[in-house]
Image (cartoon, rainbow, N blue to C red):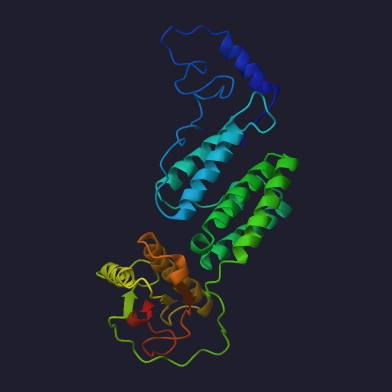
Amino acid sequence: MMAKGFIVGAGLAIAVSVAAPANAITPFNVPGTDFWDHPFGSVFDSRSGLDLEANGIAFNQALYSGYVELSEDRSDGWLGADWDFEDGELFNHKARTASKNSVVLPEEPSDRKLTEEQAATFQDAIERLRRSFDQGGRYLAAQDTATAQVKYDCWIEATEDGRDGDAEACRAAFEQAMAAVQSQANYALTEIDYSTPAPAMAAATPSETQFIVLFDFDSSDYAPGNNTIVREALDAALGNPSSSLRITGHADRSGPVEYNQTLSERRANRVIEELVSGGIEPTRISGEAVGETQPLVPTADGVREEGNRAVVINLN
């Protein structure tokens, strides 16, 4: 993103010629940096993410390590070909966010200066990456999925800056990681036959082995009071470590079928994420999203029904 080359060198020459007070912090004496490694250490924040304690799920811990390495690669060296302090700062901030177990998203192709052909290539890649998220990659293949996201970001950043060799290496690493993810992530979130809706199911009744979590309309936010139901299911699963959990996401019948399928996936993933974060091994969980094709409460098409905006957790 940042221009590189002789202009940078000229800027340094000007900076060197300016005298600074003895106690001033300059690019030469900024605490915790070595000027020869980080000549812009006082301008771009590329080191604040180093040596943090990464908390949370394994996926975020792996993201943290990957983005730290990528930030270092973009920020280190003396007039190296890969210098990009702006992206070094970006990847450092992504590392810091991941260390807090917060959501870190891959780079959007629309945010980068790409040709139409390049943008189409990266749009396909990011959609594949997102699909791997939906299929449970962040839990069933945490390290490989994190590697795929970091290498995707490396690939798109190097492509934008015209570093073809670096871009190709990152692309190859992305494809290798994606192949590993696809061999492990198997949540059945998309195998729905839209042409033949299943008959309505009988209204489910919560029990000691079944928990029904309701959601707000057109949202993956819990309906008031329903966050405690996920906690109840988590406690039951933790108390029965030999059990498995089946997660099924639903949507009501208002809106397009395809949209409701995606909405039910988001709801199922919301519950799965909380269960895994709470200590449930991903291998104990199987997931499915059925959209509006298997309503819990029989309704006509187009009807808003709270009982169908649900995720069912079955403890087996």
Q: Position of residue 117 (x, y in %)?
A: 73, 54
Residue at 47% in and 35% down: 50
Q: Nearer the viewer, residue 179 or 223?
A: 179
For the view shown, which residue lies furthest in the front direction? 242
Q: Does any portion of residue 108 appear in the rendered image?
A: no
Residue at 75% in and 41% down: 165
Residue at 52% in and 18% down: 27
Q: Nearer the viewer, residue 287 or 183?
A: 183
Q: Position of residue 144 (x, y in %)?
A: 58, 56
Q: Position of residue 22 (x, y in %)?
A: 43, 6
Q: Is residue 108 left or right of residue 55?
A: right
Total numbered labels placed on residues in the image:
0
Q: Quadrant of residue 39?
A: top right
Residue 240, relative to residue 169: is it above or below? below
Which quadrant would the C terminus be assigned to in this image? bottom left
Q: Is residue 200 left or right of residue 226?
A: right
Q: Nearer the viewer, residue 26 or 78?
A: 78
Which quadrant would the N terminus be assigned to in this image? top right
Q: Nearer the viewer, residue 243 or 80?
A: 243
Residue at 55% in and 24% down: 40
Q: Does any portion of residue 182 appear in the rendered image?
A: yes
Residue 306, relative to residue 154: is it above or below? below
Q: Position of residue 4 (x, y in %)?
A: 67, 28
